[in-house]
């Protein structure tokens, strides 16, 4: 097993003095599926933000694929993000643009030729069962379809790490299962996956390592060493 | 990667950046056509003022050509006699005689569009001898000395030379230079501000898209360079319109206002047009860079989008 993510004594304190994370010590190996659980405000999103370089730790080290993220400069962060696929809780899709145009964005940065871009997008859309919606504006899609588009955008560059923030949050169980099937299918090809979720049903149905956060601290880790009080 | 592979990749990069720049340029035109008109007006104003200034400076230069002295001779004095007398002064000069027809031709050459002057009878144009100092001797003091000597020669009615005029007009030239410098700086700042604001508006319109680009790993240069391209296109488009407007302005002034004047207007020569274009492009590119860069710095977090 190759160590993919290492967080060592990580604290996050926001400008307003609120503590986001405290004393986080986590090691995640390549190919692992990890659920980050906890109540709202427990620090799940902050933990994901640390990993895609959108938040810097106030203390401690966050290492991804042997790179210390807080030491990376702007260009380094950009290259790091090319290896990470992120699904946001609020999806962050361009509602007025079509599904195809939304999926073009991550490919454009590689200056790929149009035919290559089309080939990749069509192939993924077929796998995700939304090929027929490719020319629809995102705003015309249902919640489940939008979720799959957001997932497609995260997966299109075949990332080493998939970060998903409540990917099944607003979905019925049928759509939630579809989304999880897709994530796990990709994960089985070697991607490391971190899913922040409240959904206990998903955790039971699709087993993986569980890290529980409470008030910014890890209170339970089913796969690693236990920290502080054990939940 | 092979050299060919690198070449293809560079071409893909250029094509992508150019097409993005083109899209932003058309977006700017659609979203803020006023900015193109504003830049065009600013540059036209600048070029028009420059044309008038440039023409005035050229006219002053002609008036104050200190190498030449015009000698007007009295009626009845033979040209050959006068040339003999002048050559006895033994000075480093050359002479050229302008009879009445040559004097008229000279005026017509200076004012090619003056049709009324062309109709005047040749007798009205005074004969004169133009004395040109050798380059090495064309110093202010020496020209003055020579003019004084020539005035003493019998048969000479009047002597005209540019030194005194030049002294008076040099201040005018200096003032006009300072004025143009001031106008240049003002125009440059105004163009930079207009381009900055146009791009800033576009950035706010596409803020979410830019943040998604950042999220998926776009570098700063990936975002900034197309805006710089768009600024170059906007500058080029506005400059072409302004050049055209300036040519029409000069033609109109020549045809209707300065028809029979000794003063006539020049458009700046092509190298100067090219120089102005380079300055404008540099201003536009710098403004675009600062605008997008500061925007990206300010919007640090993806979660702000």
Image (cartoon, coloured by chain):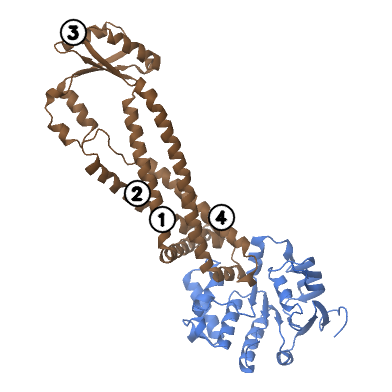
Chain colours: A blue, B brown
Q: Are marks 3 and 2 on the same chain?
A: yes
Q: Chain of mark 2?
A: B
Report in which chain the residue with disc 4 lies: B
Q: Tell me how far mark 1 sits from mark 4, CA to CA.
A: 20 Å
- Distance between the alpha carbons at the discs numbered 2 and 4: 27 Å
Q: Which of disc 3 and disc 1 is earlier in sequence?
A: 1
Q: Which mark is residue B81?
A: 3
Discs 2 and 4 lie in a common subunit: yes
- The residue singled out by tag 2 in the image is B243
Q: Earlier in the sequence, mark 3 or mark 2?
A: 3
Callouts 1 and 4 close, C-beta under 8 Å: no
- Chain letter of the residue carrying label 3: B
Q: Classify mark 2: residues with Cα within 10 Å, few (<14), some (14-19) or many (20+).
A: some
User: Could you tell me which secondary element the residue under label 3 belongs to?
Assistant: helix
**Picture quarter with the N terminus of chain B:** bottom right
| Residue matched to label 1 | B38
Image location of residue B274, percent across then percent down: 40, 44
Q: Which residue is mark 4?
A: B290
- Determine the residue positioned at 72% across, 87% down: A198
Q: Is residue B4 visible?
A: no
Q: Residues within 10 Å of mark 3 (few under 14, many from 20)?
A: few
Residue occupying image coordinates x 39% and y 45% = B46
């Amino acid at each position: 097993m190759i160590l993919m993510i290492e967080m060592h004594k990580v604290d996050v304190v926001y400008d307003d003095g609120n503590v986001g994370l405290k004393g986080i010590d986590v090691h995640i190996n390549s190919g692992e599926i990890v659920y980050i659980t906890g109540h709202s405000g427990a620090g799940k999103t902050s933990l994901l933000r640390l990993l895609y370089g959108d938040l810097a730790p106030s203390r401690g080290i966050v290492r991804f694929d042997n790179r210390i993220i807080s030491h990376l400069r702007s260009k380094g962060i950009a290259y790091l993000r090319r290896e990470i696929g992120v699904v946001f809780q609020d999806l962050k899709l361009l509602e007025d643009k079509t599904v195809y145009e939304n999926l073009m964005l991550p490919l454009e940065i590689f200056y790929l030729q149009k035919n290559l871009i089309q080939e990749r997008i069509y192939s993924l859309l077929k796998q995700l069962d939304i090929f027929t919606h490719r020319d629809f504006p995102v705003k015309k899609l249902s919640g489940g379809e939008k979720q799959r588009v957001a997932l497609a955008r995260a997966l299109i560059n075949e990332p080493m790490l998939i970060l998903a923030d409540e990917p099944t949050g607003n979905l019925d169980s049928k759509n939630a299962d579809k989304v999880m099937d897709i994530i796990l299918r990709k994960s089985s090809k070697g991607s490391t996956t971190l899913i922040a979720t409240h959904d206990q049903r998903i955790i039971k149905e699709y087993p993986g390592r569980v890290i529980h956060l409470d008030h910014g601290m890890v209170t339970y880790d089913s796969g690693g060493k236990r920290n502080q009080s054990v939940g | 990667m092979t050299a060919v592979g690198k070449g293809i990749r560079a071409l893909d990069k250029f094509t992508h950046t150019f097409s993005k720049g083109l899209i932003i340029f058309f977006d700017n035109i659609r979203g803020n056509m006023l900015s193109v008109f504003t830049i065009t007006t600013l540059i036209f104003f600048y070029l028009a003022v420059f044309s008038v200034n440039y023409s005035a400076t050229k006219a002053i230069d002609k008036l104050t050509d200190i190498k030449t002295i015009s000698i007007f001779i009295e009626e009845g004095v033979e040209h050959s006699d006068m040339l003999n007398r002048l050559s006895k002064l033994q000075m480093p000069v050359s002479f050229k005689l302008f009879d009445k027809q040559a004097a008229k031709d000279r005026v017509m050459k200076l004012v090619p569009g003056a049709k009324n002057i062309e109709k005047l009878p040749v007798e009205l144009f005074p004969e004169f001898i133009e004395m040109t100092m050798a380059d090495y001797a064309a110093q202010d003091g020496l020209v003055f000395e020579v003019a004084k000597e020539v005035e003493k020669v019998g048969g000479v009615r009047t002597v005209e030379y540019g030194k005194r005029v030049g002294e008076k007009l040099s201040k005018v030239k200096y003032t006009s230079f300072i004025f143009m410098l001031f106008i240049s700086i003002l125009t440059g700042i105004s163009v930079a501000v207009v381009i900055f604001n146009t791009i800033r508006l576009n950035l706010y319109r596409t803020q979410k898209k830019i943040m998604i680009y950042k999220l998926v790993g776009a570098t700063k240069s990936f975002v900034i360079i197309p805006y710089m391209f768009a600024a170059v296109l906007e500058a080029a488009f506005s400059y072409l319109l302004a050049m055209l407007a300036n040519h029409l302005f000069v033609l109109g002034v020549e045809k209707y206002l300065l028809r029979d004047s000794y003063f006539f207007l020049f458009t700046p020569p092509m190298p100067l047009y090219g120089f102005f274009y380079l300055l404008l492009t540099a201003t536009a590119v710098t403004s675009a860079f600062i605008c997008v860069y500061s925007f990206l710095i300010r919007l640090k977090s993806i979660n702000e989008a």
